[in-house]
Amino acid sequence: GLGLGMTGAAIAGALTMALSKLARLLLVWRFVGIQPYDRDYVRLAVPSGGALLAAWAAARALSDAGWPITLVATAVVGTVVYVALLLVTGLAPEERRAIRRMVGSLRRSS
């Protein structure tokens, strides 16, 4: 074997899940004609990539901390960066208007 142990098991599980999802998507697209993803999903690449890099950097910076601290900090950093980048680059105009209306109604009610 390759001797990857737990890391190999995690990689195999992730690949299996991704390939299974892809196969299901292709089957639905082929037989039902439904494709849920379009060009609008590309705009999520910046927030997703930024969150991935930030989470990776946080995990590297905290590599000497215990795993619970690393796990929580990585999740928090990745989430904060994702939301920030989503608000700046990833929202469609109608989503921006909906957020403005929601914030406006929250301000009026308080």
Image: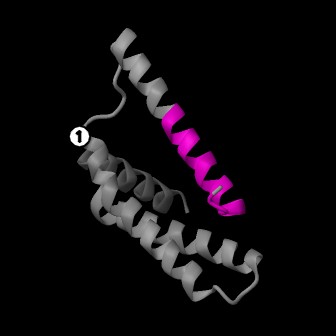
In the displayed structure, would residue 18 be above or below residue 55?
above
Is residue 55 left or right of 1 when viewed as pictured?
A: left
Residue 7, x across and y down, in percent: 65, 62
Q: Residue at x 57, y 40 (%)?
A: 16
- Image-quadrant location for residue 34: top left
**As rendered, which of 64 and 105 lies closer to the eye?**
64
Q: Quadrant of the N terminus?
A: bottom right
**As rendered, which of 89 and 105 lies closer to the eye?**
89
Q: Residue at x 65, y 63 (%)?
A: 4
How is the structure coloured here? one colour
- Image-quadrant location for residue 49: bottom left
Q: Where does the magenta region start and end?
A: 2-20
For mark 1, does the 10 Å Cα neighbourhood hold few (<14), some (14 to 19), or many (20 or more) residues?
few
Q: Residue at x 31, y 44 (%)?
A: 41
Q: Main secondary structure of the magenta part?
A: helix
In the displayed structure, would residue 86 be above or below residue 77?
above
Is residue 79 left or right of 72 when viewed as pictured?
A: left
Is residue 75 left or right of 57 when viewed as pictured?
A: right
- Residue 51 visible, this angle: yes
Q: Give the residue pinned by disc 1.
A: 39
User: Total label count?
Assistant: 1
Q: Residue at x 23, y 40 (%)?
A: 39
- Residue 32 visible, this angle: no
- Find numbered disc 1 in the image and state the secondary structure of the residue it sits on: helix
Q: Residue furthest front?
A: 1
Residue 80, x across and y down, in percent: 50, 71
Mark 1: amino acid: Arg
Q: Quadrant of the C terminus?
A: bottom right
